[in-house]
Image (cartoon, rainbow, N blue to C red):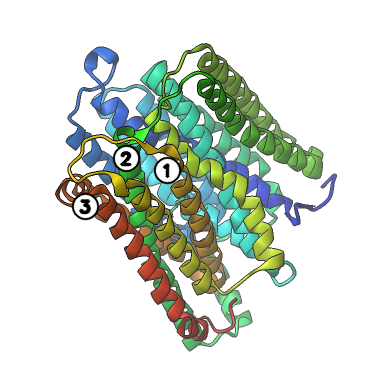
Amino acid sequence: QTAGPNTILGHPNSLFVLFFTEMWERFSYYGMRALLVLFLISETAKGGWGWSRADATSLYGWYTMLVYFTPILGGYLADRYLGTRRAVVLGGFIIAAGHVSLFFETIPSFYLGLGLVIAGTGLFKPNISAIVGQLYNKDNEGSRDGGYTLFYMGVNAGAFFGISLCGYIGEKVSWNLGFGLAGVFMILGALQFFFSQAIFGDIGTAPSKEKTAAAKAADDTPAHVVADRLKAIFVFAFFTIFFWFAFEQAGGSMTIFAADYTDRTLVGTSGLVFKVINSLMTVIPAAILTWLLFQLHRATGKSQWLGNLLLVLAFAVIWGLVIWMLGREFAMDQSEVPATWFGVLNSFFLVILAPAFSKMWEKHWNPSGPVKFGVGLVLLGLGFAALAFGASGIPSGAKTAQVSMLFLCLAYLLHTMGELCVSPVGLSYISKLAPARLLGLMFGVWFLNTAIANFIAGKTGAYIDYISSTYSMSTFFLIFTVIPAAAGLVLMALSPWMKKKMHGVH
Ligand code: GLN
């Protein structure tokens, strides 16, 4: 029995159940990831394991690659045996068990924990992404890109609070509390999904294999069209490797840039201004999400009370932690912006901009997929161009400099706008182009692009030191201006070919 309207912001209510589940999963993923290297390299006296930076980043590289590799297996298992929904529930609880295991911080439980998160993410990530698409059909098809964009806002809301809260607590209070916090939210998220499932009706219950016979009979898509559309998926996935490769490089090199080459000093009132901006940055996303939770509760009412209650509980904890953290930060005198602070700008900008992009795709400007992707890649390149420009005055080989922080902020803004043109749009196109019986598997293919990009970024990450000392910092950023921008232009040029291969999928 639904109590309220069937839609929120013009999208099915059930989208927001997925939104919040994905939010907690990403909270745990990004929150733990933010701690991982810091924990491993921290001295044993400070509770860490005293690893070398090289060993820690190598483990991190393997971890972030494997997490995006297993979705291909998880997607396949859901298609053949489990169905998307059961895969999400199972994956969610396996991830939660992984975080609990990490909490204990012994060597065997640590590796077991990483393994469980890797395995669980394989089941969870491609299949929750597939369910989003299953909520759209010919009646509300026009909202699909916008729906995935809102879903992606959930991804980044999770990243934002995970990085801010787990990162903060792990580093400043205790490592295992940071790991534990990731676990708590994943448990709440998995339970919330489990108890809210009625809202999906029969979506995602049977493996698509079981539906295949019926679907095949009903589905008159000719085989060559299916084959062409699969080709289009591979082309999208291929070009996204360039995106994530540059984006991941960005993550690493931009933190180094922030730490060594920017002027982050806070004097007099600028310290206070920074504290106010930082507080607003935390409070605004928390307020938007609380509003969404309220909408979900209003729309689903009694029928979803248990799932909603778990969400309320999780939000009470988030608000408590946010207020506690801001209070602590306010009491502290700060002489500079921490170099790691810039890391949350990406997810912050994404949460703020996603509703606007969602509306834009639905109502104002909705070019074809290859054009959106092309624009996204070019925007990513422009972000690096801003950095190249900012870094242009730094003499080659200089160890420090005083470039304005604004260049970094501008770069993160352009990168985030680019990401909004590529990543959620890509998910939407996979769901439109993949035949039902291969849906999970094709999402696995999609995430494989990130595994490959992370692998390449891990291998080439060390070149920043080499290029910036032999040539200049600016040269390094120019390389990453050219690579994505060129890839974007090529994809735009391929647009007519892609349109043919997509056979009417817009
Ligand atoms: N921020 C995205 C997420 O975690 C990135 C996914 C990807 O494909 N790299 O969902």
Label annotation for residue 257? 2
Residues 148 and 204: in front is 148
Label 2 residue SS:
helix
Distance from the alpha carbon under mark 3 to that under mark 1: 22 Å
Secondary element type, mark 3:
helix
> From the viewer's perspective, is the residue at label 2 or at label 3 nearer?
2
Q: Position of residue 470 (x, y in %)?
A: 14, 49
Nearest to N terminus: mark 3 or mark 1:
1
Query: Crowdedness of circle 1 by 10 Å Cα count: few (<14), some, many (20+)?
Result: many
**50 or 231: which is nearer to us?**
50
Above or below, comparing residue 18 to residue 442 in the picture: above
Judging by the rendered image, the residue that carries numbered circle 3 is 460
**Whole-Å distance between the Cαs marked 2 and 3?**
17 Å
Q: Amino acid at mark 3?
A: Thr
Residue closest to the eye, 407 or 427: 407
Q: Amino acid at mark 1?
A: Leu
Which quadrant does the C terminus fall into? bottom right
Taking depth in this image into account, of 341 and 110 the one nearest to the observer is: 341
Return the disc, 2 or 3, that comes first in the chain's sequence. 2
- Crowding at label 2, few (<14), some or many (≥20) Cα neighbours within 10 Å? many
| Callout 2–callout 1 Cβ contact below 8 Å | yes
Q: Earlier in the sequence, mark 2 or mark 1?
A: 2
Is the Cβ of the residue at disc 3 closer than 8 Å to that at disc 1? no
Q: Residues within 10 Å of mark 3 (few under 14, many from 20)?
A: few
